Amino acid sequence: MFRAIIRWSWLAAIAMCSSCEEASKLQGPPVSFSSYPRGKAENLQRLLGGELTLASARDTQHLRVAYNPRTQLNLLTAAETGDTLLWARVIRQRRLFYVIERVDDSSYAVHAARIRPRFIQGLNTNWAQMVYLDNAIQRGQYGPLIRARPPAPGSQRLAFDLQALRPFFRTVLDSLPRYAVLHPVVAPPGKQPNHPRPVPQTPLFAERTRLYPNPATDQVTLAVATSGGWKAQLFTLGGHLLQTRQTRDSVLVLSLAGLSPGDYLVQLTENGTRHTAKKRLQVQQ
């Protein structure tokens, strides 16, 4: 059994759906499964490396990839902010990768991806793929797989049948953009830059941190599950440090008075370690 955190708000933002449906998207996927495909867990860090850029004609995504062999979960984070984009088990069946995220104690979200040395399709499109599947169900397809149908449309519960669903996933992937896989260029010995690189987010420490509310107006609360002290720093997205707070308490409140509306970066650092977590904060009036 495995655990996963699903960032439905982020997934909804990349799905090709109208803005009037945003409220319903935040409640969870429109389709989930009562079971999931079995197979050997794939290590995406081994396949993709620890850091990469995905580039398409539409956008560019800078990602960091980590894999926990104990939980067999892959963690994808945004390189600039440290925000969690994907935390899931991945298996491979007949050249397609299936990304499995836990919704609750009895249901799972599953979507497909193509991962090749030079391109990737569908890796972060869980919401979009489940919307397409929900539309197919509304047209009368996949009836034998339905295990629970709520009174209102959406939130269908299906049994996962790989043989029945593989053609669907292949068709959906064909409609999604291809992202070229680019890796950082490493300078030759003796030509490394003199300035230190920022300390990357530590996945296990990041799991123990919380930031709320987000978006925020006049203040934001930071919570860290740690027995030692820690530091909070507020930056602009351009890297300008706005304030620093130290505490030994588990909860800290940052004042946002005087800040212009927009996006900021909050970095949390555990004292005595190099453990960090980065959170993107949106400030509203």
Image (spheres, rainbow, N blue to C red):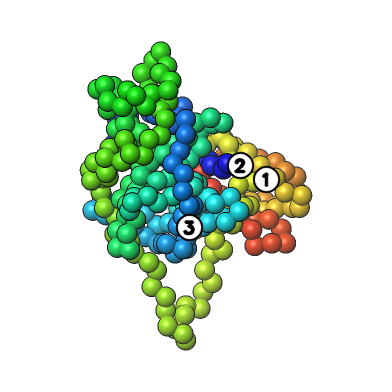
Q: How far apart are marks 2 and 3 (CA)?
A: 27 Å
- Return the x and y of residue 45 as percentages of the image width and height: 47, 60
Q: Residue at x 33, y 63 (%)?
A: 117
Marker disc for residue 43: 3
Q: What residue type is labelled 1?
A: Val
Q: Is residue 59 left or right of residue 191?
A: left
Q: Which of marks 2 and 3 is in front?
A: 3
Q: Which residue is drawn at 40% across and 34% down?
A: 160
Q: What residue type is labelled 2?
A: Arg
Q: How crowded is mark 2: few (under 14 residues within 10 Å), some or many (20 or more)?
A: some
Give the residue at mark 1: 224
Please identify the quadrant where the N terminus is shown.
top right
Quadrant in which residue 254 is drawn: top right
Q: In this view, does 135 lie to the left or right of 47?
A: left
Q: Which residue is drawn at 29% across and 55% down?
A: 179
* Residue furthest top as drawn: 151
Residue nearest the observer in this picture, 246 or 17: 17
Give the residue at mark 2: 210
Q: Which amino acid does label 3 sit on?
A: Asn
- Return the x and y of residue 210 as percentages of the image width and height: 61, 42
Q: How far apart are marks 1 and 3 (CA)?
A: 28 Å
